[in-house]
Image (cartoon, rainbow, N blue to C red):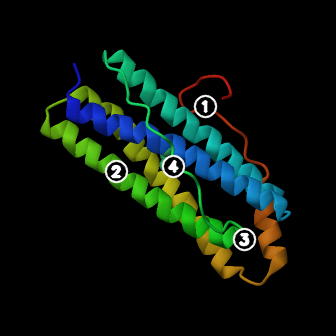
Amino acid sequence: MISKKLLKALSDQLNAEFYSSYLYLAMSASIDNEGFKGFANWLYVQAQEERTHATHMYEYIVDRGAVPEFKAIEGVKGDFSTPLKIFERVLKHEENVTKSLNAIASLALEEKDHATYEFIMWYVNEQVEEEDTADEYLTRLKLSEGNISAIYNLDTILAARTFTDPFGGAAA
Ligand code: OFO
């Protein structure tokens, strides 16, 4: 049985993963209307991926014989009118997500809940790639500032992203 403290931490993380999905969907909608269809596509796919992170966490909690607490998902606020503004926020957001995942990993170790530690380490490791990708696009956008053809070039690259469920399920 999972401890109350860990259940709370995992429930909060479940909520945070849904918030991530919500955030990326909001960014996608805004930037789509600014004419950057490739960035909109990348963010839409990212929102789908975040949803799988949430449902995978849900499955783990239920498999451990517990029921997650379903709290309200925070509303999304922010200026998502340019790819640069978006990726500044994406990187900051992902860095915060990494911090909360690391805190859960530490708590699981403290409680000697090795199954939860193993489970959460998938997410911790996934963050390395997510932060790296956000950082790479942010750097490229900073370098291309003011150069619209360079930004559209990146938009074309991001248009090619397709959704693959990291846990092998069907499209969400
Ligand atoms: Fe859920 O992977 Fe980043 O936030």
- Asked if residue 141 lies left or right of residue 129, the reply is right
Frontmost of labels 3 and 4 is 4
* Residue 38 x, y percent position in the rendering: 79, 56
Image disc number at residue 100: 2
Q: Amino acid at mark 1?
A: Asp
Q: Amino acid at mark 2?
A: Ser
* Comes first in the chain, label 1 or label 2: 2
* Residue 9 x, y percent position in the rendering: 30, 39
Q: Quadrant of the N terminus?
A: top left
Image disc number at residue 82: 3
* Residue 36 x, y percent position in the rendering: 81, 62
* Comes first in the chain, label 3 or label 4: 4
Query: How many tags in the picture?
Result: 4
Q: Which residue is mark 1?
A: 165
Q: Which residue is mark 4?
A: 74
- Asked if residue 113 lies left or right of residue 54, the reply is left
Q: Amino acid at mark 4?
A: Glu
Q: Which element is circle 1 on?
A: loop
The answer to whether residue 11 is above or below residue 155 is: above
